[in-house]
Image (cartoon, coloured by chain):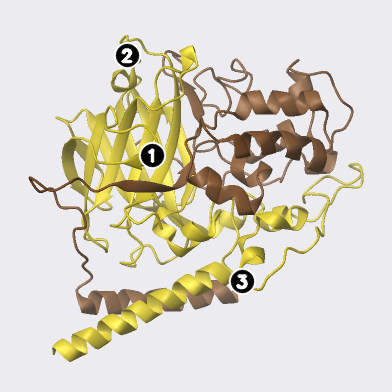
């Protein structure tokens, strides 16, 4: 709480100072004939939630952040190694998670007539709630991920045999969608 | 006057630096929020979440969303600093041929802010085929400009866009996660810090008599924070495969700078 309050006070000061200064910056890349276009280098990447965070060592996140999601052998290998060593699951579980979660792209099926998204819906044939896949605002991606890593989700789907190595105390974080959605674009809750 | 202005700029710079330091040391908690030193130092480039879903208002459309700038405290949404980083090129990248195991990007949608502060205007480039496949990119064709915090329509109304502060839709008991896997907590990787051993082997909130799991109440760490959201709603046909058919796509979001930092 203290750090939040400290941040709030500092933010207010910054708001004042920036306003006093005019609060403007410069156009870094103005379009201009005859000037070579600015070259932008990737410093951050995200697709499926919680993949980097769950499976990959913190010190390697910067590698994934600067790599194409289809050329990322670091993440691919650590999906497997985390599953077997930290989570203590079978090699079959590790291989299944690698094939589901790599390449590191969020899959959606635009040919689906489903009106709702469902995280990992494409990869599971709709078992998570919709063949559209993608990710809905309210999807409990953490519990879905925890169930696949530490629970019996994969064996329940028939993807792998039950390895009997579930960690039942790690299968849900027991929090739920606290925000709200709207029927009007951009569909998310106004700031609090 | 010039001297005063310079002093004000120095003060502003120092305060921003101080906030970033605090942000790094004290706020260091979240999911993909704050997942490398580079993005902790540049929170406007810190992508926290990606969403892809059918548009609620039009079955022919799809919505792509990325959230950046984690942990904007409640009540601070109107702070000018909480805006898109004008040094960053934000991109949705879409692989439209994954049915044939081709996961490279075939379409990109790019956003770039004109200036700092919430009066910024934002240009959308694309959707279009990328000039370069991979991690070094230039902007594609501009398709219009819109203002921060204002839902807008571009491309003759076919595409809706928004960039602004919204409540963070993500939910997670982060504090408990970091007790279970301390390595993922940025603060343990700050200079002079070491990663401590795990102090928990269970999440919270389990019913009594569940295999000895913790029954302590769980806490949604993100419940009282906002993020900056970039949304684009467009016809699914704009992301069709090269044959024109609607099919499976792979989506990811990136943040890029000319300096790589």
Q: Residue furthest left?
A: A33
Mark 3 to mark 1: distance in Å? 40 Å
Front of the two marks 3 and 1: 3
Mark 3 to mark 2: distance in Å? 48 Å
Horizontal relation, residue B137 to residue A30: left or right: right
Q: Chain of mark 2?
A: B
Q: Quadrant of the C terminus of chain B?
A: bottom left
Chain B image colour: yellow
Horizontal relation, residue B59 to residue B32: left or right: left
Assign a secondary structure to mark 3. loop
Q: Which residue is mark 1?
A: A187
The picture places residue A160, in percent across and down from the top left corner, at 78, 19
Viewer-proximal residue among A25 and B153? A25
Q: Chain of mark 1?
A: A
The picture places residue B162, in percent across and down from the top left corner, at 29, 44
For the residue carrying disc 3, how many other residues have a C-alpha within 10 Å: few (<14), some (14-19), or many (20+)?
few
Rendered image quadrant of residue A76:
top right
Residue B242: numbered disc: 2
Assign a secondary structure to mark 2. loop
Front of the two marks 2 and 1: 2
The picture places residue A135, in percent across and down from the top left corner, at 51, 32
Viewer-proximal residue among A48 and A99? A99
Residue at image coords 32%, 56%:
B84
* Disc 3 and disc 2 on one polypeptide chain: yes
Horizontal relation, residue B97 to residue B109: left or right: right
Q: Is residue B60 above or below residue B5?
A: above
Residue at image coords 32%, 13%:
B242
Chain A image colour: brown
Viewer-proximal residue among A16 and B41? B41
Residue B191: numbered disc: 3
Front of the two marks 3 and 2: 3
């Amino acid at each position: 709480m203290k750090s939040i309050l400290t941040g709030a006070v500092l933010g207010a000061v910054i708001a004042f100072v920036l306003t006093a200064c005019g609060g403007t910056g410069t156009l870094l890349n103005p379009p201009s004939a005859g000037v070579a276009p600015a070259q932008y280098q990737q410093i951050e990447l995200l697709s499926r939630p919680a993949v980097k965070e769950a499976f990959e060592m913190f010190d390697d996140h910067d590698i994934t952040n600067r790599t194409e999601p289809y050329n990322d052998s670091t993440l691919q290998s650590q999906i497997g190694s985390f599953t077997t060593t930290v989570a203590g699951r079978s090699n079959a579980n590790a291989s299944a998670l690698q094939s589901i979660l790599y390449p590191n792209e969020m899959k959606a099926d635009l040919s689906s007539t489903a009106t709702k998204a469902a995280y990992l819906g494409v990869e599971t044939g709709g078992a998570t709630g919709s063949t559209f896949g993608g990710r809905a605002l309210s999807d409990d991606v953490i519990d879905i991920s925890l169930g696949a890593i530490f629970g019996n989700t994969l064996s329940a789907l028939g993807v792998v045999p039950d390895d009997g190595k579930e960690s039942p105390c790690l299968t849900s974080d027991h929090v739920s969608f606290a925000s709200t959605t709207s029927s009007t674009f951009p569909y998310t809750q106004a700031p609090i | 006057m010039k001297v005063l202005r310079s002093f004000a700029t120095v003060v502003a710079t120092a305060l921003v630096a101080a906030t970033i330091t605090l942000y790094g040391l004290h706020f260091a908690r979240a999911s993909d929020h704050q997942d490398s030193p580079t993005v902790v130092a540049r929170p406007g480039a810190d992508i926290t979440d990606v969403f892809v879903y059918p548009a609620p208002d039009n079955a022919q459309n799809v919505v792509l969303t990325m959230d950046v700038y984690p942990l904007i405290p409640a009540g601070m949404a109107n702070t000018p600093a909480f805006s898109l980083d004008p040094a960053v090129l934000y991109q949705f990248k879409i692989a439209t041929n994954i049915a044939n195991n081709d996961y490279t990007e075939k379409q990109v949608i790019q956003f770039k802010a004109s200036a700092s502060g919430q009066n910024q205007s934002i240009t959308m480039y694309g959707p279009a085929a990328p000039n370069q496949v991979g991690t070094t990119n230039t902007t594609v064709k501009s398709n219009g400009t819109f203002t921060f915090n204002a839902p807008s329509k571009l491309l003759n109304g076919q595409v809706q866009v928004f960039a602004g502060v919204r409540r963070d839709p993500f939910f997670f008991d982060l504090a408990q996660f970091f007790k279970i896997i301390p390595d993922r907590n940025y603060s343990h990787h700050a200079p002079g810090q070491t990663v401590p051993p795990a102090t928990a082997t269970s999440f919270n909130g389990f019913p009594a008599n569940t295999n000895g799991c913790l029954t302590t109440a769980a806490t949604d760490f993100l419940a009282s924070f906002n993020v900056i959201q970039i949304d684009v709603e467009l016809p699914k046909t704009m992301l069709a495969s090269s044959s024109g058919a609607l099919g499976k796509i792979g989506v990811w979001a990136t943040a890029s700078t000319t300096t790589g930092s």
